[in-house]
Amino acid sequence: MHPIRPLARRATPIVAAALLAIAGGAQASSHREAPFITTSPKVDAADFYMFNSYESGRSNFVTLIANYLPLQDSYGGPNYFDLDGNALYEIHVDNNGDGAEDLTFQFRFKNDLSNGGAGITVPVGDQSPQIAPLQKGTVSELRDPHLQVNQTYTVTLVRGDRRTGTAAAVTNASGGSATFDKPADNIGSKTIPDYAAYAGKHVYNVNIPGCATPGRLFVGQRQDPFAVNLGVVFDQVAAPVSALTDPNAIGASTSTLAYKNVTAIALEVAKSCLTQGSETVIGGWTTASLRQTRLLDPSPKAGLQTAERAGGAWTQVSRLGMPLVNELVIGLKDKNRFNAAKPKDDGQFAGYVTNPSYPKLLESYLELPGAAPTNLPRNDLVTTFLTGITGVNKPANVVPSEMLRLNTAIAAVPYAQQNRLGIVGNILAAGSDSAGYPNGRRPKDDIVDISLVAVMGGLCVANGDTDALGFGAACKPSAVPLGSAVFNLNDNVDQAQQTFLPGFPYLNTPLSGAGAMAAQAQALAKPAKTPKSR
């Protein structure tokens, strides 16, 4: 990465307020980001991560994590949060920069009633009715006999076009099965006394077709990793200015998602199996598709998922690469279209990137005319979101398209040494962590703060007058009215305070029903946190 000098970090209160307000608008990641997807939460992509694995001994691997079905209340029984058996979940990789998938990992799910479809019964007089809850007793094993429903899934690797390419099954390295088990959600400690150990039994070593090195696989419920304060921001940043002007207030507020779970699809693959030739940069994104025709049966038969009949071609309804794009960049009328589009066709949305509306909208919200960058068209955002940054994660040959891009040749940084601001952290402190967002995305990366720097022109300030990062001649410090103060943004919620695992699947054990309610009640009873210094 190009060396970038540290910059001044102190902002005036009014400038800090503007920056924090922008952060507010960016906090939802991709929960409920388009009108249609609100009707189908099981195929709603919440977050997508792609990073060089930083677990000890795994430096030659890349981890890909696609989170679905956001905003799960951990007490959401009795059926909890299995994924949709009538949907197709996919993780795509572009390894030559042309905006089209070269590798696609396809996930299909199926629910099975135990005991050959009879479920669990109990004797009641001269009858043996099936029980109503999901479980009868303590659960600790794969396909535990105390569970009525087991959700299984298959993984298929398609090389080439996702629908017409060459397909082959990913298989269990132990025994060769092509069917995997998803753990039940974290019902509570009475049902699953040691959820971490139980979920750990569902981490598989897998053989990936065409890849000599086995990878790892896990699908299951996790604690939502994204730190955010949702309510205030969606109400036109309805907070006192005094609450938004302290640059030392990181961690002063509790994330709205701190008591929510999500379902993660996690895959770890050897770098050599994802790259092509000498190109070390890969692009990734996740999608979910439903069948074009869905019919409801007015007289469903006994069994699971019998009330719906699905058929016809797969129709893409959810898409996520770079976080926050559909929330803050794409206009409302085009949000469903963006979710249905492929990256190679993103030229149709280019105007939303070159002439973004959100900085101007914030001028109105906060009565701060002239705060938006003046380097129109915004080639700095085109570079950051659509092509990759020169010398960091830009492929040798690239078609502008929205996806998460990762340079697999940039070594991972151990968790404890990771800068939560990723590449922006390098700018602030002349550090050595160039392995974070927007070069891929790690769980610790503070997406809200980093995105704010980009949206309000901070990378133009870092770029200086030499255009070393390839943002275009118009992207100069003089084009950023906020100046170096842009780097003082702070949304009062600290992504680095989230709890993560030291290795695969990295995202933390999900909250249990009773446990989460108790923790939330305890947190609400505590006095407000004291802001910490940067």
Image (spheres, rainbow, N blue to C red):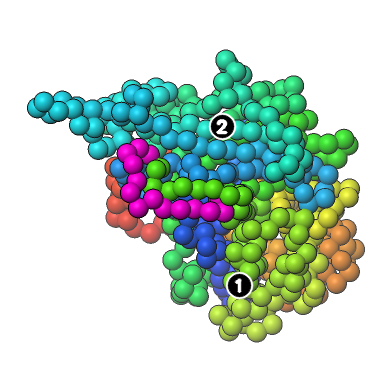
Amino acid residing under circle 2: Thr
The structure residue drawn at horizontal position 33% and vertical position 49%, both measured from the top left corner, is 299
Q: Residue 317 at what x, y percent from top left?
A: 58, 56
The local secondary structure at tag 2 comes to strand
In the figure, 150 relative to 380: above or below? above
Q: Residue at x 86, y 40 (%)?
A: 279
Q: Position of residue 335 (x, y in %)?
A: 61, 66
Which of the 4 quarters of the picture holds residue 379? Answer: bottom right
Decide: few, some or many residues near mark 2? Use Cα within 10 Å; few <14, some 14-19, many ≥20. Answer: some
Residue that badge 2 annotates: 154
CA gap between label 2 and label 1 equals 35 Å
Q: Nearer the viewer, residue 367 or 181?
A: 181
**Percent position of residue 237, x then y:** 50, 73
The quadrant of the picture occupied by the C terminus is bottom right
According to the picture, the residue beneath numbered tag 1 turns out to be: 333
Magenta region, residue range: 291-304
**Nearer to me, 114 or 376:** 114
Q: Number of labelled discs?
A: 2
Labels 2 and 1 touching (C-beta < 8 A): no
Observer-nearest residue: 114 or 63?
114
Q: Would residue 300 be counted in the magenta stretch?
A: yes
Is residue 511 in view from this perspective?
no
Q: Residue at x 30, y 29 (%)?
A: 119
Examine the structure image and report whether residue 398 is included in the region drawn in magenta. Answer: no
On screen, residue 468 above or below 151: below
* Residue placed most toward the observer, 87 or 464: 87
Q: Is residue 38 left or right of residue 475?
A: left
Residue 42's disc number: none
- In this rendering, position of residue 426 left or right of residue 339: right
